[in-house]
Image: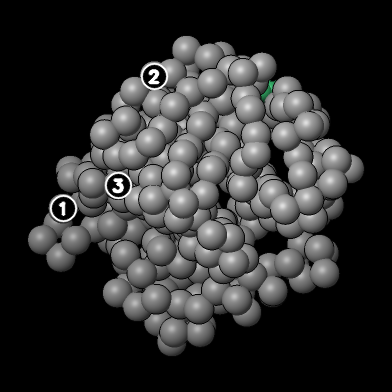
Amino acid sequence: MDRYLVFGHPVRHSKSPFIHTLFARQTQQELEYGLAEPAVDEFAHALQVFFAQGGKGCNVTVPFKEQAFTLVDRLSPRAKRAGAVNTIKLTDDGVLLGDNTDGAGLVADLKSHGVTLADSRILLLGAGGAARGALAPLLAELPSELVIANRTHTKAQQLATEFHDLGPVTAQTYEQLAGPFDLVINSTSASLQGELPPLAPALIHTDIAIYDMMYGASDTAFISWAKQHGARQTMDGLGMLVEQAAEAFTVWRGIRPGTKQVLRELKRNLGVI
Ligand code: ATR
């Protein structure tokens, strides 16, 4: 049977096996999908062993995405832009192809929630790996403006410069931000420490869409905060998780699984509904 897995550290709580097993059942593909948690300095070796032993493909998550970028034989254009690899496929001619499906997953999830990206004013919070992966797919949707704000302003400036050729992207400090924005995407890891990005509450209005790439069994700190300040449409990153997985499954198997039912089952599994 074709073997796939996700590499991460820690990875025990990953939902990827759950999601891909449902995709496989739905599309009647014979495959198994597991977990691997190598020590941080053993990832390269573990990856090599997995493919030497017949593995067909894998996902890569924190903290290995940047390392995976350097270990594959070939990169897709979107992985090259993202500077990180979250999906690897062993091609029929034995080439390890590195791809990145995170940004496509974000855009697919935003669209599935009915969020309009074309001609919209988007505020992206954070300038780390998650923000980098989102930039090209967001700019491909032709927003009127995309502003990056980050605690360390120079990192936002660097990203804006790097992606400038793809669309109207600028960097502003949190203090400089002037609304109205149509969509705010939180790509920061602030929620992991129970913190909030230092965004002025005045930027939140009833018609704004709020997206947090993080997710949990209850509202993330950022989503709670946005709701308190009047946001009516809030979305967490669970949909993005399922959509990026669907994109990876499509890369591997050449068949696109449906996501709606899988997202519902995942929510039930997490106790969200
Ligand atoms: P990821 O790969 O998830 O993007 P990362 O590359 O470590 O992780 O980036 C984390 C992002 O969250 C950074 O933009 C970071 O800001 P700095 O560049 O200033 O470090 C941002 N971040 C983390 N904690 C934050 C906080 N409490 N408030 C605001 N931004 C925060």
Which sits in the foreground, 169 or 219? 169
**Amino acid of disc 1:** Val
Q: Residues within 10 Å of mark 1 (few under 14, many from 20)?
A: few
Q: Which residue is at a point 81% across and 63% down the rendered structure image?
A: 272
Question: Where is mark 3, residue-wise?
Answer: 78
Image location of residue 22, percent across then percent down: 56, 76
Image location of residue 233, percent across then percent down: 74, 57
Between the residue at mark 3 and the residue at mark 2, the CA separation in whole angstroms equals 18 Å
Q: Is residue 212 left or right of residue 48?
A: right
Q: Which residue is at a point 59% across and 67% down the rendered structure image?
A: 114
Label 2 C-beta lies within 8 Å of the nearest ligand 1 atom:
no
| Secondary structure of residue under mark 2 | helix
Between the residue at mark 1 and the residue at mark 3, the CA separation in whole angstroms equals 17 Å
Q: Residues within 10 Å of mark 2 (few under 14, many from 20)?
A: some
In the displayed orientation, state which residue is furthest to the right: 228
Query: Can I make out residue 101 in this image?
Result: no
- Residue 166's place in the image compared with 243, above or below, is above
- Residue 36's place in the image compared with 164, above or below, is below
Question: Where is mark 1, residue-wise?
Answer: 95
Sequence-wise, the earlier of marks 2 and 1 is: 1
**Amino acid of disc 2:** Gln
Q: Residues within 10 Å of mark 3 (few under 14, many from 20)?
A: many
Which sits in the foreground, 222 or 193? 222
Image location of residue 255, percent across then percent down: 35, 78
| Secondary structure of residue under mark 3 | helix
Which sits in the foreground, 188 or 263? 188
Quadrant (top left, top right, bottom left, bottom right) of the N terminus: bottom left
Of the residues tagged 2 and 1, which is closer to the observer?
Answer: 2
